[in-house]
Amino acid sequence: MADWDYIIVGAGSAGCVLANRLSADPDVRVLLIEAGGRDDYPWLHIPIGYLYCIGNPRTDWGYRTAAEAGLGGRRLLYPRGRVLGGCSAINGMLYLRGQAADYDHWRQLGNPGWGWDDVKPHFLKSEDYAAGAPGDEDHGRGGEWRVENQRLRWDILDAWADAAVAAGIPRTGDFNRGDNEGVGYFKVNQRGGWRVSTAKAFLRPALGRPNLKVETHALVERVLIKAGRATGIRFLRDGAAEEPRARRGVILSAGSIGSAQILQLSGIGPGALLQTMGIPVIRDAAVGENLQDHLQIRCAYRVTGAKTLNTLAGSLLGKARIAAEYALFRSGPMSMSPSQLGAFARSGPDVATPDLEYHVQPLSLDAFGEPLHDFPAITASVCHLRPESRGHVRITAPDPRVHPEIAPNYLSAPADRAVAARAIRLTRRIMAQPPLARFRPEEFRPGPGPEDDVALAEAAGRIASTIFHPVGTVRMGSDAGAVVDPELRLRGLDALWVADASVMPAITSGNTNSPTIMIAEKAAEMIRAAG
């Protein structure tokens, strides 16, 4: 007799949702496996704590990309959560669904049931939208996934919003009604100034159920497959291997890096790659291909006469005041998400829906993890929402402890380089508008230089970094090249599902965490219906 009905691999943004929904049936026994530890590190709960969690082996896998030709050969830090809550425990906390057109595109790509009208109820189901009015058809109330207004505003960001309006971008108070065009403050997944992760929102309320067990510090080696059916998993902990079994099936929710790696280690992936690793090929499939990510171009400007985090946190006294404000009121800079003000805009008149997203920050630094600059400045990061560049994730050894190769291939598509040039030009146009004139903005990244498309694309590559939205490596679809079908079942095998951002056929036009939660909600319904 199998030990469990379902085994879920990965207690991150999707896995915690699945564990809650599947274990809600008392007759179903669920095992949730997490490679990281418990979410008992204090910085996981304080919004500004992402600074101490990204790159920290206690909470982050510590990946780096391969050398990226489009970024001048740089290798980027590639954070992925390794803790209960996964990336939702270390990310930017921004609540964004993307555009209705994204999901209608998924449907048109051969994924019936994934159009906007199909997925919207799954967003609403888990949402607890603090600003929503009773009867608001676009937002849910009372769900697990708390959405609140930010607890801090900045004069310089208010002026930037006015400048964006002057440049032709409309003002909006809500990016989540299907059309996200506009400029406004992001809504965040927080409750009273504390971060909300999926571990807090979905997993913690379910931990008392006798039919749910959570195993931490358990590194999955492979899925066990017998006669074309997933029967369980093999995981390593403290030097010993364990092999729990699943009666109804295995669900991979380890993310676009982890799920692809586990499948390849299990013999499901590009046949030639697996053969070079000495792994028997169970199914030759395009696992690990189709990697997509948002690349942010971090344009930065010196300003005069503005309050910014650079100056507020530039002294011990300033840091003390920031800490006191958070301790007393749960507000101030320690309650900040990495980005406060956002904008969704079109890079040109030939674009049907916004293809650029701004994350505007009252700070500047050379690179993540480096100190803030010692002068007042702001950063207007802008990313191409629907890049054409495609990369891959490929194992480099038949060992789950060895990181795979992550090669996003940023700016490899000519269209992406053209949009990068447009994005820098639009940013400069916004910064030149009258509402910002009193702050005398002076661009220092990328700085003055030739302004033709080629030069601007090269400049973008010098200052750009990932915004940590990898998707697509276990693509869903109805075509022969898809890895999973629209019900998220592994094509050609039984009792094996994938439910996380890796199944997205195309990246959403916005941050990807809440769409991943939606995928898990929909997956739970489909898996329950399958019996």
Image (cartoon, rainbow, N blue to C red):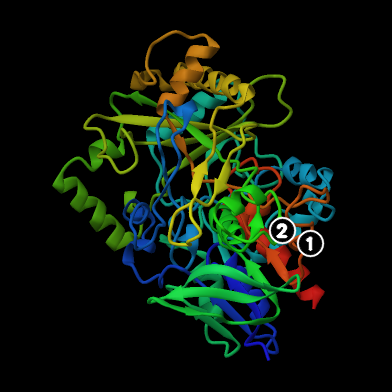
Above or below, 255 against 351 in this view is below
At 67% from the left and 62% from the top, the residue drawn is 498
Above or below, 408 against 114 in this view is above
> Could you tell me residue 447's position as x and y percent?
37, 16
> Looking at this view, is 401 or 141 the one in front?
401
Q: Name the residue under label 2.
A: 283
- Mark 2 lies on a secondary structure that is strand
At 75% from the left and 46% from the top, the residue drawn is 103
Describe residue 21's horizontal placement relative to residue 382 as left or right: right
Locate the N terminus by quadrant: bottom right
Q: Which disc is residue 492 wearing? A: 1
Of mark 2 and mark 1, the one earlier in the sequence is 2
Which amino acid type corresponds to the residue marked 1 in the rendered image? Gly
Quadrant of res 263: bottom right
> Could you tell me residue 276's position as x and y percent?
56, 50
> Could you tell me residue 489's position as x and y percent?
75, 63
> Looking at this view, is 115 or 36 the one in front?
36
Q: From where the camera sits, is residue 472 visible? A: no
